[in-house]
Image: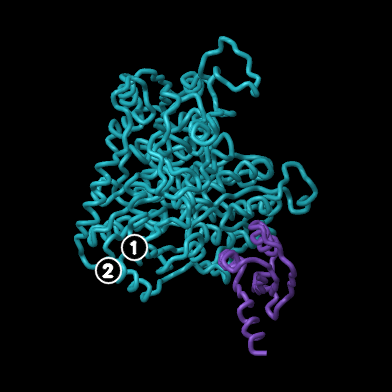
Amino acid sequence: MTTKTRTGADCVVEGLRQAGAEIVYGLPGGAVLDMFSKLYHAEDIQFVLARHEQGATHMADGYARATGKVGVCLVTSGPGATNAVTGLATAYMDGIPMVCISGQVPSHMIGNDAFQEADTTGITRAVTKHNYLVHRTDDLPRIIAEAFHIAASGKPGPVLIDIPKDVQRAETTATAPESVNLAGYRPVSGYDRDEVKLLADAINEAERPLLYTGGGVIAGGAAAELTALARKANLPVTTTLMGLGGFPETDPLSLKMLGMHGTVTANRAVGECDLLIAVGARFDDRVTGKISEFAPKAKKAHIDIDPSSINKSVSVDIPVCGHVKDILEELIDQVEPRERSTWNEHLDELKAQNPLAYDQSTDEVLPQYVIDMVYKVSGGEALIVTDVGQQQMWATHFFDYTRPRTFLSSGGLGTMGYGLPAAIGAQAAFPEKNVVVLAGDGGIQMCFQELVVAVEHGWNVNVIILNNGHLGMVRQWQEMFYDKEYSATVLKQRGRPANEKIPDSSRREFLPDFVMMAEAYGAVGLRVTKKDDVVPALEKAFSTKAPVVVECIVKEDENVYPMVPPGASLDEMICSMA
Amino acid sequence: MKHFITLLVENQPGVLARIVGLISGRGYNIETLNVGPTDDPTLSRMTMTVPGDDHVLEQVTKQLYKLVDVIEVTDLTARREDAQGRD
């Protein structure tokens, strides 16, 4: 068999096709022109032109989270690659499958401080699951196949392929191998049946069991199995931020989210349970609080695909390593149906005593009210993408997520600016869905420029900006733990601290004017300053066939409660500032 | 507590940087390091001593094993203690 000779750039397009890539997000530059000239002719692969590489990576990430497929982005060398680092780190922390292809200066120039040169594999080593600097065009077909395999298998993550310009231009007859075979990469397959038996016995014996579930349930496609297991044995379920949607929050067994801004019931249940079953979760510090006092009365079990995640922060009594879906299936067979009415009734009482609430009687526009109304007006059917901060936490309180991949958020890295581009990436995959971004006035400014991408494609992203004139979550920490000294957290034009040396003037109170910004990008801009206008504005936004930005001027000093202070145990929840 | 870790790795540029980065990034110092070829020219053998507490080194070992270029990781510390115990 003779194989056709083609260039490295051809091999990239061929590799994307073989991997089933439908959409590539990115931005061109000198070192990737060869690949772009090939993509120009690849009409089966849609190219989405971002306006900043951070935006491109978050778009690929949003696409991956919404679809479960590998997100793909393409960036140039040097600044293109360094701009992609935040997006890679975001995906890495949350285990999101992504392949990022970057251009590199020609091989003979590497190390010469060439124009737009950066040591991209060196810089991204700590924020990727794996990365490659391609030295020979002959290796390229194999490397692309490996990259997609590594990104999607085991605990998923981003993989970067750095391709020097001469490698893109040189010719080869090499093809991708039939199957990927890496001596040093063998993701866990199968599981230890004895461990599953131990866990099933522990569940059957437990009086006060608790399922604590994370992003692994969603990545592993195990939401249905989790739900079946919980219902069969009446196991209450609390999820992490990453796990939202993995178990229906409308189910009576749901305690909603746990951790720093979790519900009182979920955090109390952690303290009281006699068996804690972590499923695809990693005992993150925002979840556990003071680690030595986390679930002190419980025997602990941990189901995870990543062996290095087990016993990392908390030593567990029953480790079960393998695919969450397979293990849950086996558990469903082995657990006995039990009422556990004392435990579940106790939790129901706690729920009734400690509802997530806000002041409904006030005439002020509370940010919680806006989020509550987003849920009600969208009928709970929207795909919610959050930025990072207070709105992100309220989005966990006042929404009930019932299906996987309907809540997208930067959990581990906490990347402000994530929301809008991630929503655009998701909307590209599902043009018909109602995709809603919840963002603050701080975070939205970090990637606002990507709005034009939604406008030009006709993707009807709805951007709800909760404008409290502050970096709200940081302001909250300053109010609670830093003597109310609002250093560098005031964004509005009055009341800035003296050290910022901002002269008083008659400037408008809120800058920028988000309505004008929306219009400048060709989107529809709406501003809400009264409580009565919130619902009509949302109804208008959701029925408009164009991207809409709704700027809501909200009460500036609302805090997210409950809150477990950093480093405290989950028992030490603060429920109000009174 | 000193740990003696031996690794079988792909003989490729960048592999040493990956391993050293993983260990130094967690604030641990590599006291000795030896890298050499094996019978298979595509693989190298690395042996290093790293002082650090057992829990952290267990985690480092697991993270090393996760690296795609690392084929085998063995912490020889326990074996060495056994051998000394028998003397």
Image coordinates for residue A307, horizontal then vertical, percent: 49, 66
Of pointers 1 and 2, the one earlier in the residue sequence? 2
The hue used for chain A is cyan
Q: Nearer the viewer, residue A301 or A440?
A: A301
Position of the N terminus of chain A by quadrant: bottom right
Please indicate whether residue A154 sits to the left or right of residue A487 in the image: left
CB within 8 Å, label 1 to label 2: yes
Judge the density around disc 2: few (<14), some (14-19), many (≥20) Cα neighbours within 10 Å. some
- Chain letter belonging to callout 2: A
Judge the density around disc 1: few (<14), some (14-19), many (≥20) Cα neighbours within 10 Å. many
Is disc 2 placed on a helix, strand or loop? Answer: helix
Residue drawn at x 35%, y 37% is: A432
- The residue type indicated by label 2 comes to Glu
Q: Residue furthest bottom?
A: B87
Q: Is residue A266 visible?
A: yes
The numbered mark at residue A275 is: 1
Residue drawn at x 49%, y 28% is: A441
Residue drawn at x 50%, y 45% is: A566
Residue A183 vs A109, above or below: the answer is below
Residue ID for mark 2: A205
Residue A249 vs B71, above or below: the answer is above
Q: Is residue A1 visible?
A: no
